[in-house]
Amino acid sequence: MSNRAPDEFVDINEEVQEEWKDETTPYERVRHVIAHTYSPVSAGTVAEDALTSPKTARKHLNTLADEGFVVTATGEHGGTSYRRSPESLVVEQAADILEHVSTDELVTRIGEMRDQLNEYRSEYGVDSPEELAIEQTNQTLGDIAAEQSAMNPKTLQEWQTLRRNLAFANAALSIANAKRFVD
């Protein structure tokens, strides 16, 4: 075994980027980047991450917007910003649920999630975690003794996640029901 250093060090990140660029089209890379982008970004930002030019990224982003995968908005400086459309995310999540969970199991899980939401509503006396947070803030600001049970941040997050998961499960069930009429 030699103690000599190699003549040239290879940057693994550059190698992976080159491999990705060689194995995919600019459209595929732009779609991949925007699929993981939830806040508005410029075509230039997408282009940089997708290893393509801003002009090419903009062309593919506009195609994805026409397909409903991307939504656009005018940024504060007049430029167009792009982000993943909420509808495409819901459809993707619903399809993933249907791939892994039977319709009968989905109906059961939806019932369980609704029961848990009702327990939160009963325990805290409000319809949503946001309402509870507002009430607790107002009580704190008003220096009023809390009559409601205080909610810790973990429970607040669980309640919010439960509502999101229920929405995705309901979307999946709706798609499953609609497919019965199409098939």
Image (cartoon, helix red, strand yellow):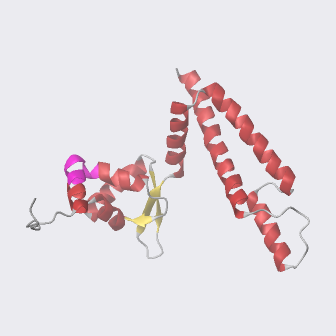
> What secondary structure predominates along the stretch shown in magenta?
helix
Q: How many marks?
A: 0
- The quarter of the displayed image where residue 79 is located: bottom left
The percent coordinates of residue 57 (x first, y second) are 30, 59
Relative to 101, 131 lies left or right? right
Q: Is residue 21 magenta?
A: yes
Would residue 5 appear left or right of 114 to someone viewing this image? left
Choose top left, top right, bottom left or bottom right for residue 5: bottom left
- Tell whether 179 sits left or right of 104: left
Residue drawn at x 55%, y 45% as measured from the top left: 90
Query: Can I make out residue 151 in this image?
Result: yes
- Which x, y percent locates residue 114? 75, 41
| Quadrant of residue 41 within the rendered picture | bottom left
First to last magenta residue range: 19-27
- Residue 163, image x and y in percent? 68, 49
- Taking the magenta stretch, the answer to whether it contains residue 51 is no
Residue drawn at 52 percent across, 41 percent down:
91
Screen quadrant of the N terminus: bottom left
